[in-house]
Image: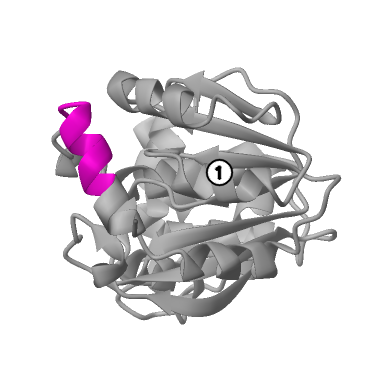
């Protein structure tokens, strides 16, 4: 039985209608699992996190390649399917809930086909983890935002944060026909590896992240104007103080979309003094 046939059978038997709003598009092309394994260089000592385990096809595959699989699934009906389909595996632990809030054991790699709608939040969460690597199937247009050129339409806060935290590598394309039901867009396999040494130093990383996100809400205004909401809201300065400070910050006459990631770092460090 093909994975497509098995997916349809499981969904029918458990009376599950895939919810597109929850990103329930199930991978039914097994060659993708082999690619994920190869790019993650899985070994028998690895503890791997599978986010949005769904029907358990990838989870089952991973269980034969590594020490332990931590399978996280938010949908209670799919958790029932996972427990039924994977009960024979002693090295799979199943967790119900939102991976961003779940209490999980330690893991060293992420290999996953996560729901598209959590991609931004997932990567912000992932950036703070100590990992060997994360190998993910991401929506192609979203993945391109991780490496967009400075000044391009897709260049934004996510590009800057990714540049600071991880190295990004693109591998095999994953056409939409490999899923059931098919999503509207194609995907790509992406490997993220935390940088051992950041390319620039930050005095206050949390403040840097808040500042970058704030500035890109006004990406086309001059920095002296775009930074005012951040100064007043986050720094708790008065309007008059914010105006004076905004005229003295680095790159005050440029626009956020024109700044390199290192420039944002220099700007954040200047505000930390």
39 or 220: which is nearer to us? 39
Label 1, secondary structure: give it: helix
Magenta segment boundaries in residue numbering: 7-16
Residue 252 in the figure: left or right of residue 193:
left
Vertical side of 118 occupied by 36: above or below: below
**Quadrant assignment, res 166:** bottom right
Residue 243 in the figure: left or right of residue 124:
left
Is residue 250 in sight in this rendering?
Answer: no
Q: Residues within 10 Å of mark 1 (few under 14, many from 20)?
A: some
x%, y% of residue 154?
Answer: 34, 72
Q: At 75% from the left edge and 57% from the top edge, which residue is drawn?
A: 42
Overall secondary structure of the magenta section: helix
Quarter of the image containing the N terminus? bottom left
x%, y% of residue 106?
Answer: 75, 29
Is residue 57 in sight in this rendering?
Answer: yes
Q: At 71% from the left edge and 23% from the top edge, which residue is drawn?
A: 105
Would you name the residue on which mark 1 appears? 60
């Amino acid at each position: 039985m093909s994975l497509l046939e098995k997916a349809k059978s499981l969904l029918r038997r458990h009376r599950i209608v895939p919810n597109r709003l929850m990103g329930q598009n199930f991978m039914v092309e097994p060659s993708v699992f082999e690619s994920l394994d190869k790019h993650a260089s899985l070994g028998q000592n690895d503890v791997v996190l599978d986010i949005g385990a769904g029907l358990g096809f990838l989870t089952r595959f991973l269980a034969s390649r590594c020490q332990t699989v931590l399978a996280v699934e938010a949908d209670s009906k799919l958790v029932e399917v996972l427990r039924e389909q994977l009960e024979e595996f002693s090295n799979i632990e199943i967790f119900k809930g939102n991976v961003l809030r779940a209490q999980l054991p330690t893991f060293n790699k992420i290999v996953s086909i996560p729901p598209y709608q959590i991609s931004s939040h997932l990567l912000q969460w992932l950036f703070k983890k100590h990992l060997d690597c994360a190998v993910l199937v991401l929506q192609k247009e979203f993945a391109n935002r991780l490496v967009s050129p400075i000044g391009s339409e897709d260049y934004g806060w996510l590009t800057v944060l990714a540049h600071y935290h991880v190295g990004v590598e693109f591998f095999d394309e994953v056409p939409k026909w490999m899923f059931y039901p098919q999503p509207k867009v194609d995907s790509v396999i992406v490997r993220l590896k935390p940088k051992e040494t950041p390319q620039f130093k930050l005095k206050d990383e949390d403040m840097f992240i808040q500042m970058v996100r704030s500035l890109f809400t006004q990406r086309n205004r001059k920095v002296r104007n775009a930074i005012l909401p951040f100064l007043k809201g986050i720094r708790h300065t008065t309007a008059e103080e914010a105006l004076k400070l905004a005229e003295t910050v680095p790159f005050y006459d440029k626009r956020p979309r024109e700044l390199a990631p290192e420039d944002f770092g220099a700007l954040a460090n200047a505000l930390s003094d």
